Amino acid sequence: MITMDTPMKNNLLHIIFGMATFMIVIQISSSSTIFGGPGDLEEQLMDTMEEGTENHLAYHSRSYGINELGSMEDNAWQMVGKKGNQFVVNDQPFYLNGFNTYWLMVFAADQSTRGKVTDLFKQASSVGLTVCRTWAFNDGQWRALQKSPAVYDEEVFKGLDFVVSEAKKYKIRLILSFINNWDAYGGKAQYVKWGQAAGLNVTSGDDFFSHPTLRSYYKAHVKTVLNRVNTLTNITYKDDPTIFAWELMNEPRCTSDPTGNKLQEWIQEMTAYVKSMDPKHLLEIGLEGFYGPSTPDRVQFNPNTYAQQVGTDFIRNHQALGVDFASVHIYADSWISQSISDAHLQFTKSWMEAHIEDAEKNLGMPVVFAEFGVSSKDPGYNLSFRNTLLNTVYKTLLDSTKKGGSGAGSLLWQLFPEGTENMDDGYAIVLSKYPSTSNIISLHSSRLGIFNSRCSWKCHWGCKKKPTLETFLYHDEL
Ligand SMILES: *[C@@H]1O[C@H](CO)[C@@H](O)[C@H](O)[C@H]1NC(C)=O
Ligand SMILES: *[C@@H]1O[C@H](CO)[C@@H](O)[C@H](O)[C@H]1NC(C)=O
Ligand SMILES: *[C@@H]1O[C@H](CO)[C@@H](O)[C@H](O)[C@H]1NC(C)=O
């Protein structure tokens, strides 16, 4: 990232923003032929939002406004920040349509599979996806990043460097997670094994949260990742705007302490630790979003009664100092019933609405639905159901976005490039195989693009003064 603290900077920014505005107008005008006349594009886009599940966009590469300013380079590629309930970048809102692909680092570590990472980012950007969540860990396993505490495989780290540098080429930002709650890629169980090997008296996976030595292992890993200098770009991770946010852990649960105290203390300690070293990046926990003991009136929204006993607590956990936004996962098929039914869609909507409301009223932060999807292996599954699920998530979010609410984005679980189907657990979406799904994703990107570029777009049509962000965020003109 280049920064210039001279008067030149302002002029340059002026020119860049001028050009950016111009390009957005061009892009919006040209894509508007799909929808009708350019004049009331915005209105028509919003109208199409009410039309339900089908649309008639052809699946092809398109432009999505501000995020595709390829030649604008580093001055336009700023760190994403937060203002109230919204993400912001370059003084504009940043609503995100994104995805998960967890294995990128491991694929990138090997020259023979590295190309899949590029394929994926290219395909994701062709449907306007702008954020990818992936693992910045692989502990003690095959192709481990961390082979043992504080011992790293440089080849695998270079793989992660590649993921970060390649993401930027396609204007995709990353959420990087530091560890898994589950055993895949090592997880907290691997830290406990390391502790045992070092002679600690630790037995359960949850000792990961409480034992001071295991906490220190985790902190050492965080410190290593934050201070990593990317071998391809020379940018230190903690300074790199390509990284959208850090995530403490994938789906933390601490069933050994249903009061939630053990996990709460761990979260508080680790958010403070990350923020002390990297105050610039956004930070989230990685929770699934279950309501816990601090909000007995909200547990009714949980998918089942077990959910309030896993040691997590959506509201209390997210009140920890240093947490910037809330994360929620949505898995009706693993939480309610594996058999597909309309109840899954109803749950999805009410689960989302409850969390959006809490993020607005109780937390004062954005909320990202960081994993959602459905497995093709579920009984009763068909493509039309998956498409309806996506539409349900997107529509629920847009209802919030239109009002300037806390619903800030969603990340599909999960997007794969062609030729990686052997990794598919049933949830993978390969865009070229499912044009109807691609169209739904693409249309949602277009709609968010309108919100994200709206500010400068309006300015182009003669605003003397740039409307303040608040005007955009809180004045509901739609
Ligand atoms: C190991 O920890 C357990 C539970 O914390 C405790 O009951 C036990 O006495 C400890 N064993 C040793 C050898 O310290
Ligand atoms: C990174 O820094 C090294 C040493 O300062 C320099 O030789 C190299 O050219 C730089 N690479 C990039 C991509 O900037
Ligand atoms: C797809 O699955 C849903 C849910 O199981 C079902 O209601 C619907 O009829 C199915 N549609 C088709 C076209 O098979």
Image: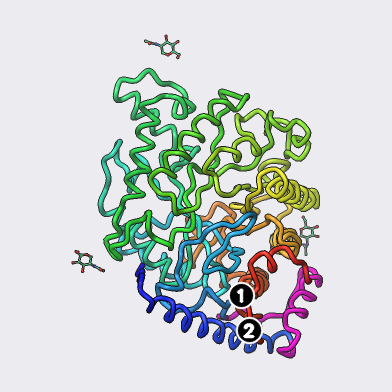
From the image, tell me which residue sits under label 1: 453
Residue drawn where x is 66% and y is 69% of the image: 444
x and y, in percent, of residue 13 in the image: 45, 78
Front residue (pair 351, 403): 403
Q: Where residue 61 sits in the image (x, y, percent)?
A: 55, 80
Q: In the picture, which quadrant includes the N terminus?
A: bottom left
Residue at the spot 64% in from the left edge and 69% down from the top edge: 468
Q: Which residues are magenta?
A: 36-62
Helix, strand or loop status at disc 2: helix
User: Which residue: 42% across, 68% down?
Assistant: 168
The image quarter in which residue 408 lies: bottom right
Name the residue tied to disc 2.
Answer: 28
What element does badge 1 sit on?
helix
- Between residues 270 and 415, which one lies in front from this camera angle? 270
Would residue 333 be found to the left or right of residue 171 on screen? right
Residue 105: quadrant of the picture: bottom left
Q: Amino acid at mark 2?
A: Ile
| Image location (x, y in percent) of residue 447 | 68, 72
* Residue 390: % across, % down: 69, 61
Q: Is residue 434 above or below residue 423?
A: below
Q: Is residue 40 magenta?
A: yes
Tell me if I can see residue 391 in this picture. Answer: no
Do labels 2 and 1 touch, CB within 8 Å? yes
